[in-house]
Image: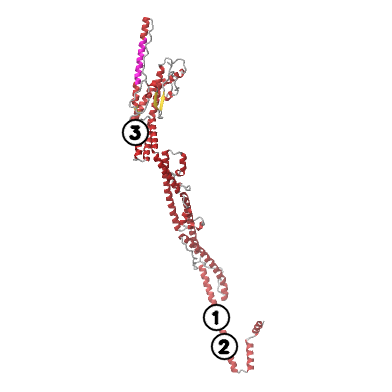
Amino acid sequence: MASDDENSLLGQTSCGSLLQQLQQIWDEVGENDEERDKMLLQLEQECLDVYKRKVEQAVKSRAQLLQTLADARVELTNLLSALGEKTYAGIPGTTSGTIKEQLAAIAPALEKLWKQKEERIKEFSDVQSQIQTICAEIVGASEEVESPTVDETDLSLKKLDEFQAQLQDLQKEKSERLHKVLEFVSTVHDLCAVLGMDFFTTVTEVHPSLNDSTGVHSKSISNDTLSRLAKTVLVLKEDKKQRLQKLQELATQLIDLWNLMDTPQDERSLFDHVTCNISASADEVSIPGALALDLIEQAEIEVERLDQLKASKMKEIAFKRQGELEEIFARAHIEIDTDAAREKILGLIDSGNVEPVELLADMDNQIARAKEEALSRREILDKVEKWMSACEEESWLEDYSRDENRYNASRGAHLNLKRAEKARILVNKIPALVDTLIAKTRAWEQDRGITFTYDGVPLLAMLDEYAMLRQDREEEKKRLRDQKKFHDQMSKEQEAIFGATPSPARQLGTKKVVGPRANGGTNGTASRRLSLNAHQNGSRSVNRDGKRDTRPVAPLNYVAISKEDAASHISGTEHIPSTP
């Protein structure tokens, strides 16, 4: 309240009233004029000093305002330049008005431009910070990235676009690198699975961030990481290739040993996981654990076990191969010295001078050559079989023809009659069959430069001998016919003279020609002649299956086994001649 009264009093007080009050005081005091003038001069001087100070302050304030206005205009210009703006809509176009009015007009524009500058700086800082972060990730820097220094002299949108374009390029590169890293990691995972290796240990050795526990965007994409990942993939692929090659070698050895020892399928199936990749390429093997070290170890142990077993069964295996070879030669009617061959095999195995694999490979080559040889002889052997069968029928027919009771109504007579009709067809075809056989045999011998033998006997010699015996038989038949004709003529003459018929002459024996099957056909016979009387004991031969073939000649009652198919065995249509 007192302060209000004082202010009210001061407001009512003026210089005149104060001077008047001072005059009254001086009057009362009795101050002389000199003192009064002195005091007035002093008051006047003090007033002047106050005015001067006020003027000086006003001048200084005006100068400051002008400087502020100038600075504001410079700042405005700098802001526009930094922001890349040529003009700004909020800036007054004229400079009229007081200084404060001009400042008041510029202030809003400055404030907006400052705010815009701060926002632009933040944008630049964010973009540059991301650029630095990605660059650090690419370089592989482990230190924390410092805040970027923004160049405030150039905050234009053009410059910002350049930084953003650079950031986009870096983000694209980062994305590509991340994709490449993930591809490498996936490849490492697949390779580790096939090789039976620990994926996490392998990939963590490259970089800890590659573990699956970290996020996708937290994985390292540095040049060093990519390089080490690529190197790891190459090492794993090479390891995979070497392991596959090793496993395929073991699988090949297993199959060879199994085939060698005729291992049953159930035992082989235990190693299907080994043999299934025997012809696969490295890229085709993708089953987890297919190339694990323990699997390869298991295959190695099995190969070693079979090798030891093979050594103990080598003689048995070799003799089995020899038996197969002998069977091929027997079916092809090729004579070999089996005892000498087996003794040679025993000697090679006992001496140890030859590897078992080489010995068996050599025997396999012999078997292959023997099969080729048998194949080249098959056509001729088929015709030899037909010839022998026809000769047996010829032998039976001769025995049947000499039986005086062949037309009696005995049991089985009609079967023998039917067989005789077919036998005559076969016998009539023998000369053509022999000629064909001789021609093919000579062509075979000319082509190969060796003699075609049948169980050690030259086939052409057998055919020539058969032809000579057949010719002898024909001449004998002709002689018997002439003798019978002469005997009949003499009987008629004696009957005309004496009127009685003499007792018939004793029937003379006739020669009989039989085929080579009557010889018995055993390997190792030095000289083979076709027996004329072999039909009395039956005929035996070695058929194409390597087994003894026993075909008896007609029994006493001539009820032989039906051979209705014998005629078709030779070929051609049947023609049944009239019954004798």
In the image, residue 289 above or below residue 568: below
Q: Residues within 10 Å of mark 1 (few under 14, many from 20)?
A: few
The percent coordinates of residue 516 (x first, y second) are: 37, 24
CA gap, disc 3 and disc 2: 159 Å
Bounds of the magenta segment: 469-488
Q: Residue furthest top?
A: 498
Question: Quick one: 155 or 333, which is closer to the camera?
Answer: 333
Q: What amino acid does circle 2 point to?
A: Gln
Does the segment drawn in magenta span residue 44? no
Mark 3 against mark 2, which lies toward the viewer? Answer: 3
Q: What amino acid does circle 3 point to?
A: Ala
Q: Secondary structure at mark 3?
A: helix
Does the segment drawn in magenta span residue 472? yes
Mark 1 against mark 3, which lies toward the viewer? Answer: 3
CA gap, disc 1 and disc 3: 142 Å
Question: Quick one: 485 or 128, which is closer to the camera?
Answer: 485
Give the position of the C terminus as an image quadrant: top left
Question: Quick one: 434 or 168, which is closer to the camera?
Answer: 434
Instruction: Classify residue 90 as left or right of residue 282.
Output: right
Location of mark 1 (residue): 59
Q: Secondary structure at mark 1?
A: helix
Q: In the figure, residue 379 lies in which quadrant?
A: top left
Residue 67 in sight here? yes
Q: Earlier in the sequence, mark 1 or mark 2?
A: 2
The percent coordinates of residue 302 (x first, y second) are: 43, 44
Q: Secondary structure at mark 2?
A: helix
Location of mark 2 (residue): 45
Q: Residues within 10 Å of mark 2 (few under 14, many from 20)?
A: few
Location of mark 3 (residue): 340
Labels 1 & 3 near each other (Cβ < 8 A): no
